[in-house]
Image (spheres, helix red, strand yellow):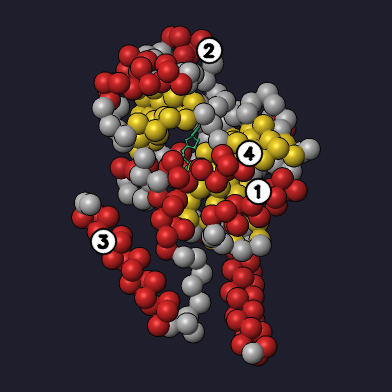
Amino acid sequence: MNHDSVVEVEALRFQQEYRQTHPEVTVLDPPDAIQHLHNRQSMLQAVADMDLSLSYGKVGVPKQLVIKKDASSISEAVGNVGLKLPLVAKPLVADGSEKSHQLSLAYDKYSLQKLEPPLVLQEFVNHGGVMFKVFIVGEAIKVVRRFSLPNVSMWEVLKNAGIYHFPRVSHAAASADDADLDPCVAELPPRPLLERLAKELRRRLGLRLFNLDIIREYGTRDHYYVIDINYFPGYGKMPEYEHIFTDFLLGLVQSKYKKRTTY
Ligand SMILES: Nc1ncnc2c1ncn2[C@@H]1O[C@H](COP(=O)(O)OP(=O)(O)OP(=O)(O)O)[C@@H](O)[C@H]1O
Ligand SMILES: [Mg+2]
């Protein structure tokens, strides 16, 4: 076990003991469930297991492959599972550090050996340059549009080679809510779909405070992909978060009070 894992295990043990010895303290979300989101493979597993297919849309995850080590075998592994180029390469660990959010786009299979495992390779899904950030606070859901990576045409894939490191889009991108966008790209995912997705994920992840990055495959009306899930995101970008958060916390206090008085 490396130093970081030892620290994590110790932190978990401390918090579990703390919960037992301090039952009066409300734990918003359990540390082990939060930990689940720090690995890009386990992060999307709940969405993949769900395989949500409803009358108003399908939600999945992009086809992906985890490479633990040995960059020289990536090209062969990609060929074996039939992943289509271009590929988004993401560090396996997503712990908020600068390095864990350095993503790149690989255009050709010969360059794949230049990547640095451990990483997740995901098929790049064209989505018209707009993504949806879905904020979840308990039962409340808010969705906003954000600019994202533009479509990559077949022609560009053939013309380009190598690895392109791209900047952290979420930091640079301003809100796309007021932009003059193609309505097919801008249309928000249907509310019932988001509600069902959020409900399922709250249950499967065992968390109440998180967000999802969702894209809609370009040229489709209802094929959605979850590409990222973050714990306790920057809620400052969630519209009306002040009321939503206050209501959420008050609701917790009230339910705790109710439980106590029923004894
Ligand atoms: N499979 C994909 N297909 C198309 N675009 C993608 C894909 N995966 C990621 N992207 C693009 O890359 C951006 C960053 O990806 P992702 O959210 O997974 O990384 P991150 O480092 O966790 O980012 P952040 O925490 O800053 O949101 C996305 O907002 C999107 O624009
Ligand atoms: Mg993201």
Which residue position is annotated with label 3? 7
Whether residue 115 sits left or right of residue 27 in the image: it is: left
Q: Residue at x 32, y 66 (%)?
A: 11
Going by the numbered disc 3, the residue's amino acid type is Val
Q: Height in image: 11 above or below 53? A: below
Instruction: Say the numbered circle drawn on residue 197.
Output: 1
Crowding at label 4, few (<14), some or many (≥20) Cα neighbours within 10 Å?
few
Q: What separation in Å lies between label 3 and label 4 (alpha carbons)?
A: 34 Å
First-in-chain label (4 vs 1): 4
Q: What separation in Å lies between label 1 and label 3 (alpha carbons)?
A: 33 Å
Is residue 132 in view?
no
Element type at mark 4: loop
First-in-chain label (1 vs 3): 3
Res. 199 image quadrant? bottom right
Going by the numbered disc 4, the residue's amino acid type is Asp
First-in-chain label (2 vs 1): 2
Which residue position is annotated with label 2? 154
Of discs 3 and 2, which sits in the foreground? 3
Q: What separation in Å lies between label 3 and label 2 (alpha carbons)?
A: 46 Å
Going by the numbered disc 2, the residue's amino acid type is Met
| Residue closest to the eye, 180 or 54 | 54
Crowding at label 1, few (<14), some or many (≥20) Cα neighbours within 10 Å?
some
Q: Residue at x 36, y 50 (%)?
A: 95
Q: Residue at x 49, y 72 (%)?
A: 27
Q: Residue 23 at what x, y percent from top left?
A: 47, 82
Is residue 239 in view?
yes
Instruction: Say the numbered circle drawn on residue 51.
Output: 4
Instruction: Say the numbered circle drawn on residue 17.
Output: none
Q: Are marks 2 and 1 in contact (CB under 8 Å)?
A: no
Of discs 2 and 1, which sits in the foreground? 1
Q: Residue 164 at what x, y percent from top left?
A: 36, 24
First-in-chain label (2 vs 4): 4
